[in-house]
């Protein structure tokens, strides 16, 4: 495993876990951390022994945003030439489900990263916000789009235009997170959810993730047609034969991912 500077990468059974490790900067997402996170996630994504991915920070902060010190003096041309946005695109290319386990500050790019994951398990202390307006800018890694889709336009407007933060309980109520757990157990819960998904038929999980994501990318008729093609395709897999036979024979299925 590579020697990372700002992340820790671990496996828990069939789950790959990436922990942000820049505590003094509240896990601000600098370019080294982002590159390391993607390297680790992509390695897990390629690993047949891994079925689901989790990213997390610390109890105090999932991530307090992109690293402001890295971009404070940048010109528009610097930003264009660095094109860090291209790095963010790698999130959407991960094929395995990715769960964010969020505690404490989840702000700016941190919130955008969490929303770019497939599911969010939050601790009771989690605080979600897009405070870029305080810095004279706007969200740049999907916040205006993903937050609006998740919580609706009026609340997204208030969060983005007036830097309103959401508590974990509010985030759950407005549909931004899957569930809220005590600070002591939120990571355990996220890992348990990931283990449960990782134990399922890998090809079906992969195509199910793709199909659900499609709901935000395409017209309904195209999404339905893609879903149907994926459904038919799964009848060419061993896992479909095994899953349906196991049901008929009243025994647990043994998935091979083939
Ligand atoms: N960047 C750099 N350092 C940060 C940071 C950040 N985002 N957030 C916190 N820190 C550092 C603080 O500077 C402080 O460092 P020292 O002074 O100790 O050296 C340390 O973390 C602890 O922070 P505080 O002392 O401020 O702690 P408090 O508990 O008092 O306050 C806070 C916690 C989270 C409320 C506060 O730190 C805060 O307001 N932080 C900034 C939050 C924020 O504005 N986040 C949005 C950042 S802008 C892009 C796409 C997306 C983005 C960028 C580019 N491309 C497509 C290219 C995203 C932009 C953003 O996220």
Image: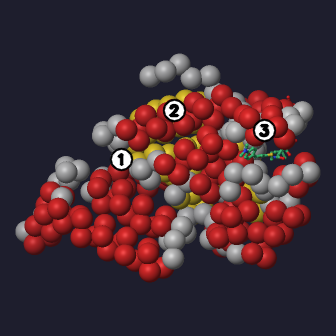
Marks 3 and 1, how far apart at CA: 35 Å
Report x, y in % for residue 242.
13, 61
Which of labels 3 and 1 is toward the front? 3
Q: Is residue 108 visible in the rendered structure shown here?
A: yes
Q: As drawn, which residue projects farthest toward the bottom?
A: 221
Most foreground residue, 97 or 215: 215
Instruction: Identify the residue position indicated by label 3 in the image.
Output: 79
Q: Is mark 2 on a helix, strand or loop?
A: helix
Left or right of 71 on screen, residue 52: left
Most foreground residue, 141 or 2: 141
- What residue is drawn where x is 57% and y is 30%? 36
Left or right of 187 on screen, residue 202: left
Which of labels 1 and 2 is toward the front? 2
Q: Quadrant of ligand 1?
A: top right
- What residue is drawn where x is 41% and y is 41%? 45
Which of labels 2 and 3 is toward the front? 3
Marks 2 and 3, how far apart at CA: 22 Å
- What residue is drawn where x is 65% and y is 63%? 146
- Give the vertical position of 209 relative to 99 (above or below): below
Instruction: Identify the residue position indicated by label 1 in the image.
Output: 51
Report x, y in % for residue 56.
58, 43
Image quadrant in which you'd find residue 73: top right
- Give the vertical position of 251 relative to 85 (above or below): below
Q: Which mark is residue 39?
A: 2
Which callout, 2 or 3, points at the residue further toward the start of the chain?
Answer: 2
Dot 3: within a 10 Å radius of its alpha carbon, few (fewer than 14), some, or many (20 or more) residues? few
- What residue is drawn where x is 35% and y is 41%? 50
Most foreground residue, 242 or 139: 139
Q: Tell me if the residue at label 3 has its CB under 8 Å from ligand 1.
A: yes
- Give the vertical position of 216 relative to 48 (above or below): below
Left or right of 210 on screen, residue 77: right
């Amino acid at each position: 495993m590579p020697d990372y500077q700002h992340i820790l990468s671990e496996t828990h059974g069939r789950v790959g876990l990436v922990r942000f490790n820049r505590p003094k900067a509240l896990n601000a997402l600098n370019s080294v951390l982002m590159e390391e996170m993607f390297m680790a996630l992509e390695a897990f994504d390629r690993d047949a022994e891994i079925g689901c991915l989790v990213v997390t920070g610390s109890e105090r902060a999932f991530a307090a945003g992109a690293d402001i010190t890295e971009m404070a003096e940048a010109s528009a041309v610097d930003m264009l030439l660095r094109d860090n946005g291209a790095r963010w695109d790698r999130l959407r290319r991960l094929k395995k489900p990715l769960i964010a386990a969020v505690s404490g500050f989840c702000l700016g790019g941190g919130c955008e990263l969490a929303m770019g994951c497939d599911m969010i398990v939050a601790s009771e202390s989690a605080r979600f916000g897009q405070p870029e307006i305080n810095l004279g800018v706007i969200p740049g890694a999907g916040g205006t789009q993903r937050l609006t889709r998740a919580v609706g336009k009026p609340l997204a407007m208030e969060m983005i235009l007036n830097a309103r933060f959401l508590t974990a309980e509010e985030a759950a109520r407005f549909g931004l997170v899957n569930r809220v757990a005590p600070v002591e157990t939120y990571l355990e819960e996220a890992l348990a959810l990931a283990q449960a998904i990782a134990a399922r038929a890998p090809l079906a999980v992969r195509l199910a993730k793709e199909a659900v994501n499609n709901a935000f990318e395409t017209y309904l008729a195209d999404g339905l047609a893609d879903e149907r093609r994926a459904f038919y395709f799964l009848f060419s897999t061993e896992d479909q034969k095994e899953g349906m036979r196991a049901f008929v024979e009243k025994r647990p299925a043994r998935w091979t991912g083939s």
